[in-house]
């Protein structure tokens, strides 16, 4: 008797034609997404090459943003983005962990079934 036979019926891989077709469509969609991202990155690299050749690392390390004067320092924008993401993570992590602990350990079954993505 294999490992799949010991799993509950709902958790066994059946592998019907519809399942295989869905898996194939999902794989193709993921591949298409990666392809689109690669094309976007290549085009961005191509279009930004003149700025990198003219300004170099100053584009990332500069602090002054004045397009009318040809100054394109992005450091404040990068710093602001990283700071915002850090604060958001610090605020969201305790809420996420507390919610997960509540749902797995303390929530009554009927509440867990409503809020959880997988049936208990």
Image (tube, helix red, strand yellow):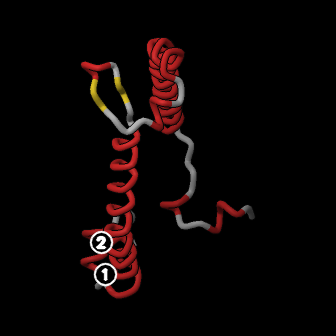
Secondary structure of the residue carrying numbered label 2: helix
Residue under the point 40% across and 51% down? 82
On residue 109, which mark appears? Answer: 1
**Farthest bottom residue?**
106
**Where on the picture, by quarter, is residue 115?**
bottom left
Mark 2 touching mark 1, by CB under 8 A?
A: yes
Q: Quadrant of the N terminus?
A: bottom right
Classify 10 Å Cα crowding around label 2: few (below 14), some (14-19), many (20 and above): some
Residue situated in front as seen by the camera: 80 or 32: 80
Looking at this view, name the residue that lies furthest to the front. Answer: 69
Q: Is residue 103 found left or right of 46 in the rendered image?
A: left
Q: Is residue 41 above or below residue 6?
A: above
Q: Residues within 10 Å of mark 1 (few under 14, many from 20)?
A: few
Of 76 and 12, which appears nearest the observer?
76
Which image quadrant: the C terminus? bottom left
In three-dimensional space, the C-alpha distance between marks 2 and 1, rounded to whole angstroms, equals 6 Å
Residue 88 location, x and y as percent?
32, 61
Q: Position of residue 89 (x, y in %)?
A: 37, 63
Question: Residue 8 vs residue 102: left or right?
Answer: right
Residue 62: x and y, percent?
A: 42, 35
- Work out whether 117 lies above or below 48: below
Q: Using the image as rendered, state which of residue 71 and residue 90 is in the foreground.
A: 71
Examine the rendered structure and indicate whether residue 57 appears above or below residue 36: below
67 or 116, nearer to the observer: 67
Residue designated by label 2? 113
- Picture residue at 45% right of the left edge, 19% below the top: 44
- Disc number placed over residue 16 in the picture, else none: none
């Amino acid at each position: 008797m294999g490992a799949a036979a010991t799993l509950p019926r709902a958790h066994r891989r059946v592998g019907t034609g519809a399942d295989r077709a869905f898996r194939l469509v999902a794989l193709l969609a993921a591949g298409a997404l990666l392809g689109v991202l690669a094309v976007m990155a290549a085009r961005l690299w191509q279009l930004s090459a003149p700025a990198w050749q003219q300004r170099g690392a100053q584009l990332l390390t500069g602090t002054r943003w004045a397009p009318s004067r040809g100054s394109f320092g992005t450091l404040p924008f990068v710093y602001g983005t990283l700071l915002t993401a850090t604060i958001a993570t610090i605020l969201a992590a305790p809420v996420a962990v507390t919610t997960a602990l509540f749902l797995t350990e303390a929530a009554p079954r009927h509440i867990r079934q409503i809020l959880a993505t997988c049936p208990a």
